[in-house]
Image (cartoon, rainbow, N blue to C red):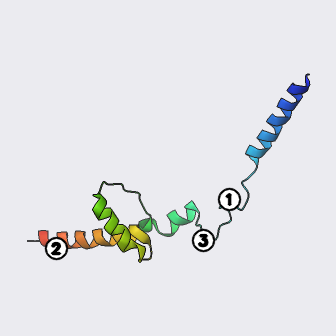
Amino acid sequence: MKKTDLYKNLAKKVDGKMKAALPPQRFAQGAVGVAKKTDKSTSDPAGRLVAVSCRLPAELVNRLRERAAGQEGGISVLIAQALNLWLESAAGSKAP
């Protein structure tokens, strides 16, 4: 074999070992407070978060960001609270 072929084979071996190895702990595998997927689904299925996208006017988004800056949980919690209040009021207004 040529010297370059030997280096290519060595590189393939090293690449295979790197792919087979687990990622180091510093890459969020051992992070504190990170729940595993199995823990989330078994502990509280109703508390799962689902990504929802929508288009809002820029002025409204800026107001939301300002309001959410001082609130724990950020913009997601603020929007969830607003939607809950709106849905409760809309359900009450539809009742005969």
Report x, y in % for residue 26.
Answer: 71, 62
Q: Residue at x 23, y 70 (%)?
A: 86
Mark 2: few/some/many CA within 10 Å (<14, 14-19, 20+): few
Name the residue that disc number 1 marks: 27
Report x, y in % for residue 2.
Answer: 91, 22
Q: Residue at x 65, y 61 (%)?
A: 28
Name the residue that disc number 3 marks: 33
Disc 2 secondary structure class: helix
Q: Amino acid at mark 2?
A: Gly
Q: Amino acid at mark 3?
A: Gly
Disc 3 secondary structure class: loop
- Which circle's residue, 2 or 3, is located before the other in the chain? 3
Q: Amino acid at mark 1?
A: Phe
In depth, the one of 41 and 87 nearer the eye is 87
Q: Quadrant of residue 6?
A: top right
Between circles 3 and 1, the one closer to the viewer is: 1
Name the residue that disc number 2 marks: 92
Disc 1 secondary structure class: loop
Q: In the rendered view, does 21 fall on the left or right side of 82?
A: right
Q: In which quadrant of the rendered image does the N terminus lie?
A: top right
Between circles 2 and 3, the one closer to the viewer is: 3
Alpha carbon separation for disc pair 1 and 2:
48 Å
Mark 3: few/some/many CA within 10 Å (<14, 14-19, 20+): few
Report x, y in % for residue 54.
Answer: 32, 54
In depth, the one of 64 and 25 nearer the eye is 64
Q: In the rendered view, does 91 fall on the left or right side of 67?
A: left
Q: Quadrant of residue 72?
A: bottom left
Alpha carbon separation for disc pair 3 and 1:
14 Å
